[in-house]
Amino acid sequence: MESSLEAHLEQLVRRHAELRDALGGSGLTGVDFARLSKEYSDLSPIVDGIDALHRARDELTSLSGLAQSSEDAELRALAEDELQILRERLPELEQQVKLSLLPKDADDARNAILEVRAGTGGEEAALFAATLFRMYQRYAALRGWRFEILDLSETGLGGFKEATASITGRDVFARLKFESGVHRVQRVPETEASGRIHTSAATVAVLPEAEEVDIRIDERDLRIDVFRSSGPGGQSVNTTDSAVRITHLPTGLVVIQQDEKSQHKNKARALKVLRSRLYEMERQARDSARAAERKSQVGSGDRSERIRTYNFPQGRVTDHRINLTLYKIDKVMSGEALDEIIDAILAEDQAARLATVEG
């Protein structure tokens, strides 16, 4: 490891010890105690990794001396075997320490709002949007996440013009954040008599779910319209003005919710989506300001970026950001193989960010 990095590790260990002593003392206010406790908790896994690395290095030195000085041939052979294992383990421990130093995305632990919209391609694009939405729904079920449909705008032929869901569970945003972008499909539509392959697209946006404390919305900045729900859903939905359209005047963002029969529930859901969209706008602005960091990321999260192609005739899915192709489209669409793509993207992002730290 570089000397500058070693000095930084020593500094972290010292700070961890200082925090431990401070927390064990008296005279801290509740606010100070909470702040120092969080810092101590954040540092603890990093320091544990540094301690494991130091112990391994000390053991390596001890075994090296034993292997060179011992007159017992059997003991020397045993020490050499242990040395070989340690030499292989040390780079892994060093890598783990470096990874622990990478800045964490504060939003990784959040739940997410998923938005899927049909893009170019007419009805076939709407059908593909529905296919994608169900893929994420199945994937959420496989991971034990709660998938709550907030709004569906259906075409009447099985397609979705747009669909919105709230996904709740462990590390939802961390695993889905790189799904934002344009997803392209190549397949023969069921309505195509000549069997020609069509290309169409759908746009996916994954937003970290924002709490009220994250984004405060001034009621004076909102225009709220109520109207009768339209589309599938049964006659009972259409007997009252239960659908809600909220326009955020400063940004022009519009959110419509009409799936619930209760106007109050639709308004609460619409505010939930609006809050997450406003939070995402702030997040994107922060990321844009960190240009150097953005260059090290796998994808910008830009909704106009084409990230993946699903080719049904060839049975393949290609992620263009990492040049990964899987010939198991059925398992990807069922959610089973989606982890293979997500894990590869996360590993690539981690490697790119690590390169900037080491560089």
Image (cartoon, rainbow, N blue to C red):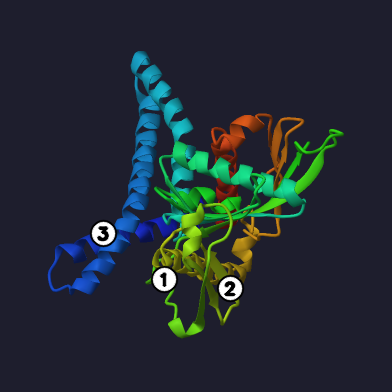
Left-right relation of 27 to 291: left
Left-right relation of 252 to 103: right
Residue 99 shows up from this direction: yes
Query: Label 2 is placed on what type of residue?
Result: Leu
Other residues around mark 2 within 10 Å, as few (<14) / some (14–19) / many (≥20): few
SS at mark 1?
A: loop
Across and down, in percent, residue 214 comes to 41, 71
Q: Which residue is mark 1?
A: 214
Other residues around mark 3 within 10 Å, as few (<14) / some (14–19) / many (≥20): some
Which quadrant of the figure contains the C terminus? Answer: bottom right
SS at mark 2?
A: strand
Q: Earlier in the sequence, mark 3 or mark 2?
A: 3
Other residues around mark 1 within 10 Å, as few (<14) / some (14–19) / many (≥20): few
Residue 259 shows up from this direction: no
Q: Which residue is mark 3?
A: 17
Q: Earlier in the sequence, mark 1 or mark 2?
A: 1
Q: CA distance from mark 3 to mark 2?
A: 48 Å
Query: Label 3 is placed on what type of residue?
Result: Ala
Residue 68's place in the image compared with 104, above or below, is above
Residue at the bottom extreme of this rendering? 220
Q: Nearer the viewer, mark 3 or mark 2?
A: 2
Q: Nearer the viewer, mark 1 or mark 3?
A: 1
Query: Label 1 is placed on what type of residue?
Result: Asp
> Residue, x 37% and y 48% (percent of image)?
50
Q: Quadrant of residue 308?
A: top right
Q: Which residue is mark 2?
A: 253
Across and down, in percent, residue 114 comes to 53, 54
